[in-house]
Amino acid sequence: MAFLIDCRVVRQPDDISPQQVSQILRLACLRILSSFQYNELYKQLRWGYKLYNLDNVPLSSAHSRTSWKDFTLQTYEEFEDVLGMCYSL
């Protein structure tokens, strides 16, 4: 499973903060990964992510990319740290 995440923050009149966007994405990814973890078809769930910013860099140029990894607490916490840096202003 792969997550492609655009790190740009689009401003709207009633927008939410970048930190809130980061928290929403963390929770959404965790829920998706967790739902597959307990499915018999996905016993060996491998996942990765690519963070980019379409305002500055074409999608083909990775802002941050990882190799495939097992879904563990450690790999997910690393993802949370990188995602937090992506949305910190």
Image (tube, grey):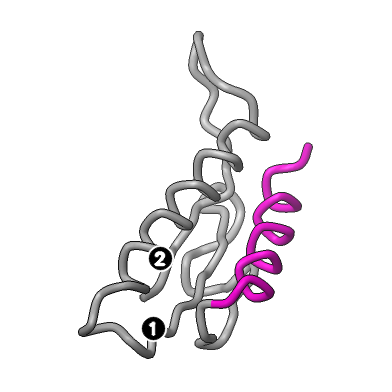
Residue 49 image point, x, y percent: 51, 71
Mark 1: few, some, or many residues within 10 Å (few <14, many ≥20)? some
The residue positioned 40% from the left and 73% from the top of the image is 2
Give the amino acid at mark 1.
Answer: Leu
Residue 13 image point, x, y percent: 50, 9
Q: CA distance from mark 1 to mark 2?
A: 8 Å
According to the image, label 2 marks what residue?
A: 33
Mark 2: few, some, or many residues within 10 Å (few <14, many ≥20)? some
Q: In terms of depth relative to the viewer, which is nearer, 50 or 27?
A: 27
Furthest-left residue in view?
41
Residue 72 image point, x, y percent: 58, 77
Q: Is residue 82 above or below residue 11?
A: below
The residue positioned 48% from the left and 57% from the top of the image is 30
According to the image, label 1 marks what residue?
A: 45
Please provide the residue range marked out in magenta: 72-89
Dominant SS of magenta comes to: helix
Labels 1 and 2 touching (C-beta < 8 A): yes
The residue positioned 68% from the left and 64% from the top of the image is 77
Q: In terms of depth relative to the viewer, which is nearer, 59 or 28?
A: 28
Q: Is residue 67 left or right of residue 84?
A: left
